[in-house]
Image (spheres, rainbow, N blue to C red):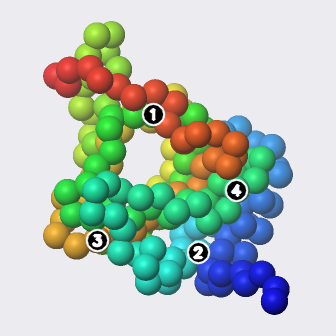
Amino acid sequence: MGIMTLARPGLAELVAGVRELVDRSATPRTTAFAVADMLRERLPSPEILTEEERLGDPGHYISHPLHTEAAFSIMAVVWRPGQETVIHDHIAWCVFGILQGVEYETLYRLDGDHLTEIGRTANQAGEVSGFAPPGDIHRVRNTGDSTAISLHIYGADLGAAPSSIRRVYDLPVR
C-alpha cells in the first residue's frame, strides 16, 4: 500500500509562483509586495484545508503548515470567534490572504518603553496584504461570530524555525 498524499486545491500553483518570485533575490519588502500581487490572483478557497482542519481548535487559533522549504513557508491559520495573537513582530516578510471571515489587525509602533497604536484594519475575505520587518508590530484577532481562515506566506523556513514570531511585546499601549 502506497502513501496517500492529501490533495490541496491550488497549493501546487501557489508554491510554484512563490518560488519564482523568491528566486529573483529582491529586497524583502519588494518580494512581499510581489508575492501579495501573485496571491491576489491565485487566492485559494477554504477547501485548501480539509473539513476537519477548517473547524479550528476551541482553545486557541491553529496553524496548519501546508508547505515549507528553505526560502519560504505557506501556512493556513484557523481562528474561531474571540481568538487572537499576542502583540508581536516577525522574523521575515509575510503575506496573508483572507479565505473566510474577517481578521482584525491592530498595528503598533514601539516608542521606547511603550507601544503606540498606529492603525486598525478589518481584513475581509478575498483581501490580501503583505509587509516586511521592521515596522510589523501587530496583533490579529477574530472579533466576529464565525470562524475565520487565512493563508500566510512567510519568507522563512518554518519547518526549521519554531515560529514566525521574532518578538512578543508585553509593553503598555498608549
Q: Amino acid at mark 3?
A: Thr
The CA distance from mark 3 to mark 4 is 25 Å
Query: In the figure, 124 relative to 6: above or below?
Result: above
Residue beneath the point at 68% across and 49% down: 159
Instruction: Residue under label 1, please give it.
Output: 89
Residue beneath the point at 28% across and 56% down: 59
Residue 154 x %, y %: 60, 49
Res. 121 mark: none
Q: Are marks 1 and 2 in contact (CB under 8 Å)?
A: no
The CA distance from mark 2 to mark 4 is 21 Å
Instruction: Residue under label 3, please give it.
Output: 147
Disc nearer the start of the sequence (2/3) = 2
The CA distance from mark 1 to mark 3 is 24 Å
Instruction: Residue under label 4, please give it.
Output: 68
Disc nearer the start of the sequence (1/2) = 2
Please tell me whether mark 1 sits on a helix, a strand or a loop.
strand
Disc nearer the start of the sequence (1/4) = 4
